[in-house]
Image: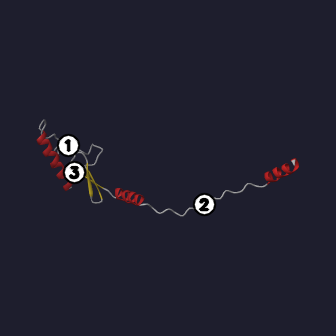
Amino acid sequence: MATRTAARTRKAAASPPKKATRAVKAPAKKSAQTRAAAKLRQAVSESKTIDPGWTWDDRLPLAQAKQVGNTIYVSGQVAYDANGNLVGAGDMKAQTRQVYENLKTVLAA
C-alpha cells in the first residue's frame, strides 16, 4: 500500500497546477447616482464666477457668487459699501439693509 500511495503523491506533485479561471463580468450599467454625479461635475466645470466689481474684495480668496447652470450660489455678505467701508456701525438695521443691497448688486451682476 505504501508504494501505491507514494506513486500517487509523485504523480500529483508532477502534474502542473490548474489555472484559475475568472468569470468575465458584463460591463455594469451606470446607475442614476453615477450619471447625476457626472452631470454635476460637468456643470461645475462650466460654472461662472460673478464679480460685482468691488475693489475691496479683490484681496479676499473668495467669489461673491458662482453660477452653476441656472442656480446662483451667493457667499456670505457683510455690511460694507462698494468702497469697503462699514455701513451702520452698531446699527443692526442699517447693516441688514446694506447686506440686502449687496445681495441685490451681486445678483444684478
Q: Residue at x 87, y 49 (%)?
A: 1
Q: Are marks 2 and 3 in contact (CB under 8 Å)?
A: no
- Within 10 Å of disc 1 (Cα), the crowding (few <14, some 14-19, many 20+) is some
**Mark 3 or mark 1: which is in front?**
1
Q: Is residue 33 above or below residue 85?
A: below
**Mark 2 or mark 3: which is in front?**
2
Residue 53: assigned label: 3
Where is mark 1, residue-wise?
A: 78
- Within 10 Å of disc 3 (Cα), the crowding (few <14, some 14-19, many 20+) is few
Q: Earlier in the sequence, mark 1 or mark 2?
A: 2
Q: Are marks 1 and 2 in contact (CB under 8 Å)?
A: no
In which quarter of the view is residue 45 placed?
bottom left
Q: Earlier in the sequence, mark 2 or mark 3?
A: 2
In the figure, is residue 4 to the left or right of 109? right
Q: Is residue 35 above or below residue 8?
A: below
The residue type indicated by label 3 comes to Gly
In which quarter of the view is residue 80 placed?
top left
The residue type indicated by label 1 comes to Val
Q: Secondary structure at mark 3?
A: loop
Q: Secondary structure at mark 2?
A: loop
Q: Residue at x 11, y 42 (%)?
A: 94
Q: Position of residue 27 (x, y in %)?
A: 52, 63
